[in-house]
Image: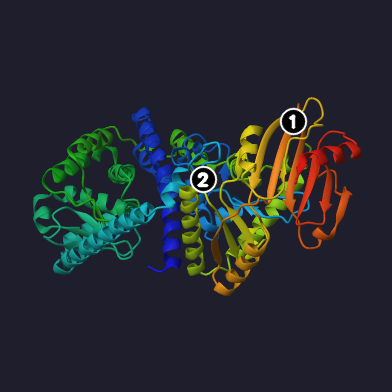
């Protein structure tokens, strides 16, 4: 199977799983309603209750509503993440979803922005990110196995359907058209009585012992000759009335639709139960339709005839191309009770039945109300991956314009989604395999890997992303122990730290520039691959951040790499940065490859910030 075809099969399978789950909830609800209103709902309304199930299973899209039953009962609550991975539009593949929704842009002083893509790895303190059930499935071959098992079941049922239809067509070919004047006149009379205006054939065939309607484009009523010999004229007319009711109600077409649903959802026992019950209720609805065209005095005779025929002959109700006179022993009793108490008024509009169906539609044919996508993306990235990325507050202090941040984030996500549409199936498959491989390597080794991105728009407009756990420390002593093993200057706790400030956390990250990065870019471009991965060994910290807090106020001391132009600058300066985005920064550059900064949300003077920054830099 080609990667593109497999991708579409997986997406279809995801839609199928979600729809099957929602329909299963609906089936249980309908069974409960039928039990509660078993003596108050007429036969045809009990049958029509199954209509929302068929619509739900075939519905390619549904509006969202706060009234949806699936706000309470959702597949995502059982398998978190399945909604995003299996129900998104085709252009949002699992790989692109991860690149788009998992990326967060950072800005550390005047350093170039990089993208940190979340991975589920343990941080320095030993904590591990919460794993997502569906991510685990999609990152293994289990999903492929499930899809193959489902396809095997579909193929098997399709093959059986074709075999059954060939047998049915053979039975029709071996039958003969009934042209006896008396029987033909009775046939036409009953057809007129039931209001059937379509052309219908009347066929006798011993290969179909039970009376049945075959075909929906060119329907035929088929009865075995031996059955006709046992029936009186009135009894035969009752049987014909039932079969014409099937034709009038297009039950063969409905049965084909139910069978198609059954083929696609063969794995769901509740769908099998729903189809079985719907076929049973279909028979009773046909009885009601036929009785509505007869006089009340014929009710008992009609019921006795139906039961008499069913005791000796029964059609195969499982075949989709047949609407046969069939019933189990339990259903025969139900049908007899319904026929005995039937009156024509009960077949008219039922306020109760209509109300129940409309209520079902309002709560089950709409999807659960989704939260704002942008907010979810930021929440998922910032809230659930603390050991892998740094939140805006940690970089920018406590006064952050979240709306502007969200707008920039969504712009990057849209560019990534547009870029994803241009990828070939082979490129998507390659990206997915490489990302999964890097995840496993990071998880196993704890090393840092750098990825060169051929398509920068997939990575927030940047050509590099860094994968691996940031070294994060909750105590200053642990940080100092690790920092002492590194080459170059480090940050230390300033002796002139303002009163009230206490150590909060420290973060150490590897370099984002230098010969290794330059070589990686060249190798990545020459490879021609959509992404190129290389392990990075580093002995000198490229970024160090020490964060201190004093109530709601924050202070962050940072060391960062500067670009070629920035390395030419010397001295202390504070850029004219928009205060609604950035906190109050002071930068210090000495002409080397590193720069230093202090950012705070408090009202420290420029002189104070310079003195604190000088005391924090150890060379």
Q: Residues within 10 Å of mark 2 (few under 14, many from 20)?
A: some
Q: Quadrant of residue 173?
A: bottom left
Q: Nearer the viewer, residue 483 or 191?
A: 483
Alpha carbons under labels 1 and 2: distance apart: 28 Å
Residue 192 shows in this picture: no
> Which element type, helix, strand or loop, lies under badge 2?
loop
Q: Which residue is mark 2?
A: 120
Q: Nearer the viewer, residue 473 or 344?
A: 473
Q: Which residue is mark 1?
A: 549
Residue 369: % across, % down = 57, 41
Q: Nearer the viewer, mark 1 or mark 2?
A: 1
Q: Nearer the viewer, residue 102 or 351?
A: 102
Residue 266 shows in this picture: yes
> Which element type, helix, strand or loop, lies under badge 1?
strand
Q: Which of the two discs, 1 and 2, labels the residue nearer the N terminus?
A: 2
Residue 219: % across, % down = 29, 62
Q: Is residue 194 above or below residue 617?
A: below
Q: Nearer the viewer, residue 208 or 79?
A: 79
Horizontally, residue 304 falls left or right of residue 572, namely left
Q: Quadrant of residue 168?
A: bottom left
Q: Residue at x 62, y 63 (%)?
A: 516
Horizontally, residue 226 falls left or right of residue 160, namely left
Residue 297: % across, % down = 25, 37
């Amino acid at each position: 199977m080609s990667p593109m075809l497999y991708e579409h099969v997986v997406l279809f399978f995801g839609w199928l799983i979600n729809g099957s789950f929602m329909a299963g909830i609906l089936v249980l609800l309908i069974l409960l309603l039928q039990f509660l209103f078993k003596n108050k709902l007429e036969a045809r309304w009990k049958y029509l209750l199954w209509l929302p199930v068929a619509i739900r299973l075939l519905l390619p899209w549904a509006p969202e509503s706060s009234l949806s039953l699936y706000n309470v009962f959702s597949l995502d609550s059982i398998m978190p993440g399945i909604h995003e991975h299996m129900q998104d539009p085709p252009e949002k593949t699992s790989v692109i979803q991860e690149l788009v929704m998992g990326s967060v842009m950072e800005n550390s002083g005047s350093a170039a922005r990089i993208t940190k893509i979340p991975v589920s790895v343990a941080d320095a303190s030993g904590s591990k990110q919460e794993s997502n059930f569906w991510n685990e499935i999609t990152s293994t071959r289990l999903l492929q196995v499930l899809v193959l098992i489902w396809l095997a079941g579909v193929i098997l049922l399709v093959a059986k359907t074709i075999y059954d239809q060939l047998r049915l067509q053979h039975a029709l070919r071996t039958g003969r058209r009934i042209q006896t004047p008396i029987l033909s006149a009775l046939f036409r009379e009953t057809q007129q009585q039931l209001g059937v205006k379509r052309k219908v054939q009347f066929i006798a065939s011993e290969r179909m012992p039970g009376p049945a309607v075959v075909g929906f484009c060119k329907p035929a009523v088929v009865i075995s000759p031996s059955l006709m010999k046992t029936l009186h004229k009135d009894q035969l007319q009752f049987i014909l009335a039932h079969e014409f009711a099937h034709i009038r109600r297009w039950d063969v077409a409905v049965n084909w639709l139910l069978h198609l649903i059954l083929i696609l959802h063969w794995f769901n026992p509740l769908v099998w139960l729903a189809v079985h019950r719907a076929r049973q209720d279909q028979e009773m609805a046909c009885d009601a339709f036929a009785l509505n065209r007869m006089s009340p005095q014929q009710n008992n005779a009609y019921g006795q005839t139906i039961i008499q025929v069913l005791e000796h002959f029964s059609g195969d109700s499982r075949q989709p191309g047949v609407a046969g006179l069939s019933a189990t022993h339990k259903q025969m009793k139900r049908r007899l009770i319904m026929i005995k108490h039937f009156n024509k008024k009960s077949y008219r509009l039922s306020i109760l039945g209509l109300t129940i169906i409309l209520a079902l539609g309002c709560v089950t044919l709409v999807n659960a109300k989704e939260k704002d996508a942008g907010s979810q993306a930021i929440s998922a990235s910032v809230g659930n991956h603390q050991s892998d990325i740094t939140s805006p507050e940690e970089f920018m202090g406590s006064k952050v314009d979240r709306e502007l941040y969200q707008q920039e984030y969504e712009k990057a996500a849209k560019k990534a989604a547009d870029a994803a549409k241009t990828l070939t199936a082979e490129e998507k498959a390659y990206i997915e395999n490489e990302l999964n491989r890097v995840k496993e390597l990071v998880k196993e080794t704890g090393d840092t890997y750098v990825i060169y991105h051929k398509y920068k728009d997939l990575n927030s407009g940047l050509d590099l992303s860094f994968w691996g756990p940031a070294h994060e420390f909750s105590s200053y002593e642990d940080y100092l122990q690790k920092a002492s093993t590194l080459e170059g200057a480090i940050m230390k706790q300033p002796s002139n730290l303002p009163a009230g400030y206490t150590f909060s956390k420290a973060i150490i990250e590897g370099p984002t520039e230098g010969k290794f990065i330059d070589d990686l870019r060249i190798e990545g471009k020459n490879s021609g691959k959509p992404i190129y991965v290389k392990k990075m060994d580093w002995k000198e910290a490229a970024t160090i951040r020490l964060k201190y807090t004093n109530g709601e106020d924050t202070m962050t001391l940072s060391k960062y790499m500067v670009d070629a132009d920035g390395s030419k600058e010397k001295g202390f300066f504070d850029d004219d940065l928009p205060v609604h985005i950035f906190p109050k920064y002071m930068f210090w550059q000495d002409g080397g490859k590193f720069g230093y900064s202090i950012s705070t949300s408090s009202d420290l003077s420029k002189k104070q910030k310079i003195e604190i920054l000088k005391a924090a830099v150890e060379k």
